[in-house]
Amino acid sequence: MLQTNLQAGTDPDVLDAVFNNVSEGALVVNRLRKLIAMNPAAAQITGWKPRDLTSISCNVFQCRNESGKRTCEESCIAQRCIETPQQFGPMFLRINRADGTPISVEATFLPVRASDPRSGVCVLLLRDITVLEHFDTTVRQLNQEVAEKNIILRGFSDQMSVAWRAAMIDLRAGAEGLRARFAKELGESGLRSIDRMVNATQKLETTFAQLKSQIQVTLQPRRKQPPA
């Protein structure tokens, strides 16, 4: 119960109701780093039960920061919270559950002063962000896949641009050569056929140019719209 650790004048029933019903996990740690209280949300996040409080300290969490370094190698954050006293966090921590599986949490260390300074405690608030971390990983993977596909699409666009341009030049040159060398033999009907060939190459050039322009627009990063 929290009422033995908080300043006088605060309704203990109200504190207990808040403590037991908030969605965030709440753990109370004393100067000896012993866990002296936990709410249902904390039990669900950590896997430890209130009945375990007589035998465990906060060391069971093996807290590590983003780089994987144990945060208590220098000094326990909960102890610093009590001794300073000042708030630490919100911060990222990776902790071990009761079964040893690691989870990612957003942790906030809040000092709570008691009438006796030696009885101060730290309230550790935990929010499970493992799902969010997995979501971020998925987003990064999707971004990487999109980037790789954009590279392939850009390469295809460049190759296509060179290939169709060379082909169109050859077709146009061939048609003009036929016109110049065999105009009399081809007659009016043959010349009309050559004109259709030249017009077809021009249409193909226009079509490929539009396609390349659309690909380039697709590859350009989209600007974020300002919030409404």
Image (spheres, rainbow, N blue to C red):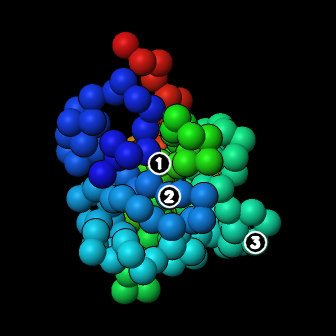
Q: Residues within 10 Å of mark 1 (few under 14, many from 20)?
A: many
Counting from the top left corner in percent of width and height, residue 37 is at 36, 59
Residue found at the very far top of the displayed protein: 228
Counting from the top left corner in percent of width and height, residue 187 is at 44, 49
Residue found at the very far right of the displayed protein: 74
Q: Earlier in the sequence, mark 3 or mark 2?
A: 2
Q: Which mark is residue 173?
A: none
Labels 1 and 2 touching (C-beta < 8 A)? yes
Q: Nearer the viewer, residue 219 or 102?
A: 102
Q: Earlier in the sequence, mark 1 or mark 2?
A: 2
Local SS, label 1: strand
Judge whether 88 appears above or below 36 on screen. Answer: above
Which residue corresponds to mark 1? 123
Q: Nearer the viewer, residue 31 or 102?
A: 31
Q: Earlier in the sequence, mark 3 or mark 1?
A: 3
Counting from the top left corner in percent of width and height, residue 219 is at 54, 47
Which residue corresponds to mark 3? 73
The residue sitting at 27% across, 36% down in the picture is 12
Which residue corresponds to mark 2? 29
Is residue 14 rendered to the left or right of residue 168?
left
Local SS, label 3: loop
Counting from the top left corner in percent of width and height, residue 180 is at 64, 50
Judge whether 96 appears above or below 6 on screen. Answer: below
The residue sitting at 75% across, 63% down in the picture is 75
- Give the residue type at disc 2: Val
Q: CA distance from mark 1 to mark 2?
A: 6 Å
